[in-house]
Amino acid sequence: MSFSLTGQLLVSRPILKDPNFDGTITLLLEHSADGAIGVILNRPSELTIAETFAPWSSHVSEPSVVFAGGPVERSALVALGATPDADGDLVFGLHSVDFAEQAPEEALGNIDRLRVFGGYAGWSGGQLEGEIANDAWWVVDGFVGDLFTDRPDRLWADVLRRNGGEMAWFAHFPEDASLN
């Protein structure tokens, strides 16, 4: 494989009937011949940061909840932060933030936006490419603002609309088309 989808968004197509990914937007954090890892951006949970990580609650972007990042290792935390100069080592210049090692003020430095995910999405080598070939996903450009949207409930439709064409037609796709 000579290309990488790192930084791209996987937009689930209505044909995808996997409950883990139905109606999701997934940001690919890494993609190589060995596989891919990402986090689902539009699945906020009901678990607030204030309930679970109180010292961090004032530092997390709204909505201040733990997002369901994917079906793999749901108890593992993935915390991603952004700085004004995008000087991190991850896609979009993001930083990985470690909740366990330091107090928020020490760990954050000049990070001004923070999102926390429980779990992540993962694919073995060739698996994601096969799913894309089978029309399970649209692959589109991602933006750091997608990660920190304060309206994750609208992200799927917003991404479809901004990409226009045939994708925009699906922005108002009903959850159950048979009821239409």
Image: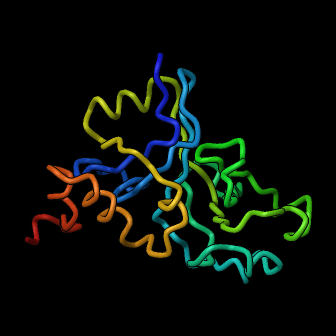
Q: Is residue 179 left or right of residue 140?
A: left
Q: Residue at x 53, y 21 (%)?
A: 33
Q: Is residue 14 above or below residue 156?
A: above
Q: Is residue 21 above or below residue 63?
A: above
Displayed quadrant of residue 46: bottom right
Q: Is residue 131 left or right of residue 58?
A: left
Q: Nearer the viewer, residue 96 or 178?
A: 96
Q: Nearer the viewer, residue 118 or 94?
A: 94
Where residue 5 sits in the image (x, y, percent)?
47, 34
Q: Is residue 156 left or right of residue 84?
A: left
Q: Residue at x 38, y 56 (%)?
A: 19
Q: Is residue 35 left or right of residue 76?
A: left
Q: Residue at x 63, y 61 (%)?
A: 117
Where residue 12 sits in the image (x, y, percent)?
33, 50
Where residue 65 sits in the image (x, y, percent)?
61, 75
Q: Nearer the viewer, residue 163 or 51?
A: 163
Where residue 108 sits in the image (x, y, percent)?
81, 63
Q: Residue at x 38, y 65 (%)?
A: 155
